[in-house]
Image: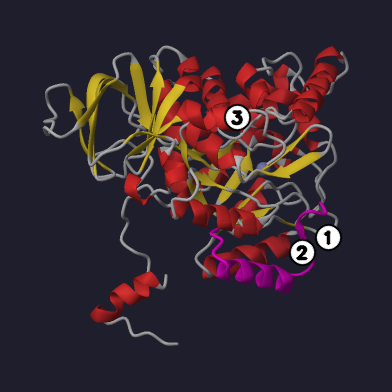
Amino acid sequence: MKLMYTSHLLPVAVALGLLAPPALAQSADQLSEDVQRYVHTSGPVVALTNVTVIDGTGAAARSNQTVLIEDGRITGLGAAGEVTLADDAVVLDLTGHTVVPGLVGLHNHMFFTSAGGRASQANFTAPRLYLASGVTTIRTTGSRRPYDDINVRADIERGLTPGPRIHITAPYITGMDGATQMAQIGSPEQARRFVSYWASEGAQWIKAYTAITREDLAAAIDEAHAQGMKVTGHICSVSFREAVELGIDNIEHGFATASDFIALKEPNVCPSNLMVIVGNEADPRGPVAQEVIRTMVDANVGMTSTLAVYEPFIPNRPTRDSLTLAVMSDETREDYLEAREQIDTNPDFPLTNTHFEKAMEFERAFVEAGGLMAAGVDPTGLGGAIAGFGDQRNYQLLVEAGFTPEQTVQIMSLNGARILGVDDELGSLEVGKLADLAVMEGDLTSDAGAIRRVKIVFKDGVGYDSGMLIEEVKGRVGIN
Ligand SMILES: [Zn+2]
């Protein structure tokens, strides 16, 4: 059927999904009864008063603020007394709390892998944990079960399940020697066919992995751009500088995955033991690092920091957070703690805290040079970086790395929104934007640990009860 886009057919076209509807916020009465159970605060008008605001733009934190939310959007933001409250406003006095924009998680899979070779799709736990932790927008950044991701997104949009806004990434693409759960691409033609199929299924991003060849990555990038999609990668066989030259849009992880640091790297080959060699030998502010950073900054290629997934591989880091352990299934927890114990008690373990500090130093150098850095949890590896909680851990680790609270909030909100191309509507607390924000107990400007005490998370101006969402997933991470 062909439709003419004349004005009287516009509602039909919108209903058929042929045209994007205007960005309307999802109101509480559009949520199913099941999702309404989690709603803490809703109303046409909600006012958050006496809060400390870190707005996500990098501007200095401001105390004693009022945030006004109407019909899902921020309509007022200013010092107490500057913002006029309507009589019908639901007023929350949030003295002693901090408000930040809803976090934008750029490496936020809908699956979970962990110690002992465990892998599970997390349709139940991941959307709840992301939302509960203040992460209101995610990019899946590589999928193992793409139709689960697509269907969960549809359920969230229809108000059938609580969760964040989801930017869909296709299954991973890698080379012929790559991992078996990924699409092994053997020719540029296959790369184009893959990209065009996933574009037709609504994927917005392609994720390249460590064994892809330059020729196939080039074809994937070219086809993705022709289809209006973007490409990111956890790359290795292709160096950061090569990928930027090929036109990649975003690069995952940073320092420890940059094969640029290997002096005699063979083309199209991922050097074995890259993380250990780079950690031992590379200088995060040396000439190679500076050239990599300059190449990325000049091409406006952003980088996704994922410190939380790296940390559990480092001996004697604080990696036994009680809430993280409580949401794991019993077997997942046992395997995780056993793996952690082996790392902490092995004097010859090849990764060290110095490696971790170098990765942090590279991220600081990248941002100092004007690089666009975002962050994401990457709920894989040993399993210690859980959906949402690992994003919160990233906040603490970025502060440990030396970023200010304002810089860190910007990295985790507005910068991610910029990379996704949604910063006109999301990513910062500004009048006119959609009301996605996280309310936490404590003063985040002086206590990074406050990020772990998120109490209410607003998405589209509807406030969800964080504790209730977390309660429901206890013992289930690693199962579903
Ligand atoms: Zn990943």
Report the residue at 55% width, 45% height from top: 296
Q: Residues within 10 Å of mark 3 (few under 14, many from 20)?
A: many
> Where 280 falls versus 147 (above or below)?
above
Q: Is mark 3 within 8 Å of ligand 1?
A: no
Q: Amino acid at mark 3?
A: Phe
Res. 362 mark: 3
Of the numbered discs 1 and 2, the one sitting upstream in the chain is 1
Residue 224 % position (x, y): 57, 65
Residue 257 % position (x, y): 71, 39
Query: Closer to the observer: label 3 or label 2?
Result: 2
Magenta-tinted stretch:
179-204
Farthest residue to the bottom: give it: 1
Of the numbered discs 1 and 3, the one sitting upstream in the chain is 1
Farthest residue to the front: give it: 33
Dot 1 corresponds to which residue?
176
C-alpha gap between disc 1 and disc 2: 6 Å
Looking at the picture, tell me which residue is in the foreground, 151 or 30: 30
Query: Judging from the image, what secondary structure is the residue with disc 3 in?
Result: helix
Q: Quadrant of ligand 1?
A: top right
Residue 228 % position (x, y): 49, 66
> Where 357 falls versus 18 (above or below)?
above
Report the residue at 44% width, 55% height from top: 158
